[in-house]
Image: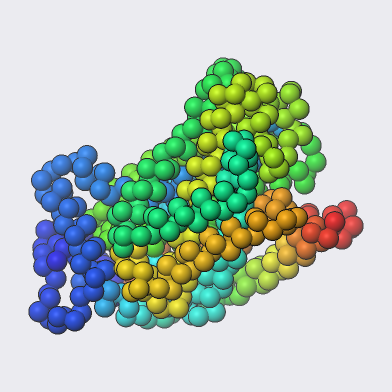
Amino acid sequence: MTPARGGPPIAEPAFEAVGIDGLGPGSLTQEDLVRSGDRFRVHKARHGRRRWYLLWLLVGPGILAMLGENDGPSMISYATSGATYGLGFFLPFILVTFAMAVVVQEMCMRVGAVTHRGYGQLVLERYGRLWGWFTASDLVLTNLVTLIAEFVAIRVGLSYFHQGPGVAALLGVVLVMFTMSGGRYWRWERIVLGLAIFNGLFLVAAIMTGPNWGAVGHATTTFLPFPHGSLKTLLLLVVSTIGATVTPWMIFFQQSASADKGMTPADVRHGRIDTVLGGIMAAVFGCGALIAGAALAGHGGSSISGLSGAGFPGALKDVSGNAVGTVFALGLIEAGAVAVLTISASTGYAVGECVGAPHSLNNSTRGAALFYGANLGAAMIAAAIILIPGAPLLSIALNANVLATVLLPVTLVFMIMLANDRELMGRWANSVLNNQVAIAIVGFISLCGAAYAIDAFLQTVGVI
Amino acid sequence: MYLEHDQLVADKNRPVPRARLGRGDSAGLWGLRVFVVVMGVLVIYTFIAQLGH
């Protein structure tokens, strides 16, 4: 590890041949060679002044983290807000939460590009095994729960086309196996990016419902009308919306993926573009799901149980036509499938980093057996659970985002500590403004999560 | 090779040193431990109680 990077960002000489002579012939791994090939293309694009090609090469982790979090449960949650309250507070609130996500994810990208290490590895090595294992265990637990919800979302989408849970389970697992094969991070990233673009189907569905764009503009600029109902319901929706945009897996994923992609401090500017671009796309598509759901407000939309039967796609078909229902169903399948790929990858990274085993998509399945095993294993466990008759899938899905939000402050606090660690980050450490915004975000999320957890607990034990 | 020295697998496997935490940092982390345990218990209890209904 090269300590404190106080110097300027990577200039020409930094890309020159690494001292292979000094390392010895056995020091270079297959993973190094594959990553070096990807970096060679970045080097050529940068020095050939091919700006758009360079951007194309460097985008990926940010867009995938953001669109991956526009997952099945999130889109159902946004559509539920729209169907229950219509256009109003939650439309601009989605934009606010994605702005928070951009601030957090930019830190992950920067730490990954500067240290070349994943989040789990750095927390374990810098702050001890207790916290390292806690953050990784927290992630694996919430990931498993979230993965179940993703398979449920795929099932909801497929049920619109009269396909059963077995097809949903098989589709998800086969996708994970297919994308992992090849032993190249670049290949995996491009396939998942290609799938993730179809998250835009939610925007298409929204446009097809023929919304009142004046009402959309009014809600976006005024946060009105404000939702009515009990404090618990409002808190649940606020916490679910936060849990749908800022999550532990995104932090693990983007930092590890940035390191796995081979990003360096010279790529931080492009990493920021990648993250902001992903945030904008995810926010727009998320708003699309809410606007599509709002078409059901006044048509019994609030009574739709989004995780049973064809749920929203079926209701949209009845209100806005078969084409809208079909597009929304396809969107749910895409959202669940992309999230299965990114969330299971973050599980693999976390397990590999904490155990100290090879953890790279640039490695072969034999060379990084634990990483690939955890990646595939997480997807297979979740797929198996949705096949169990009578499993409490609705309860699991609803609690997934809440659990992730309540445990999120721990992950965020360590993220801020790493981004401020001048021994690791040098001049790439957080600025004062960056810290003020990040701390305000942690405070807000902690407050919302704690308020909901306490309120729900007190109601469960019958105190209120 | 078009990698930085510390991008090589051999270098990445070398652990970074433990952070030297001040009193404020340690106290903050203890507060975080308490927060996590309390919130974790509340959420898990609520979740299990919901499963029972």
Count of numbered tags: 0
> In the rendered image, which quarter contains the N terminus of chain A?
bottom left
Counting from the top left corner in percent of width and height, residue A357 is at: 39, 77
User: For this view, does A309 lie left or right of residue A373?
Assistant: right
Counting from the top left corner in percent of width and height, residue A114 is at: 30, 63
B12 lies above or below A225: below
For the question of whether residue A117 can be seen, the reply is no
- Looking at the picture, tell me which residue is in the foreground, A429 or A462: A462
Q: Quarter of the image holding residue A97?
A: top right
- Looking at the picture, tell me which residue is in the foreground, A59 or A92: A59
Residue in the picture at 36% in, 80% down: B15
For the question of whether residue A461 can be seen, the reply is yes
A159 lies above or below B21: above
Residue in the picture at 36% in, 69% down: A365
Residue in the picture at 64% in, 27% down: A316
Counting from the top left corner in percent of width and height, residue B41 is at: 73, 68
- Looking at the picture, tell me which residue is in the foreground, A366 or A51: A366
Q: Quarter of the image holding residue A183?
A: bottom left
Q: How is the image coloured?
A: rainbow
Counting from the top left corner in percent of width and height, residue A112 is at: 35, 62
Residue in the picture at 65% in, 68% down: B36
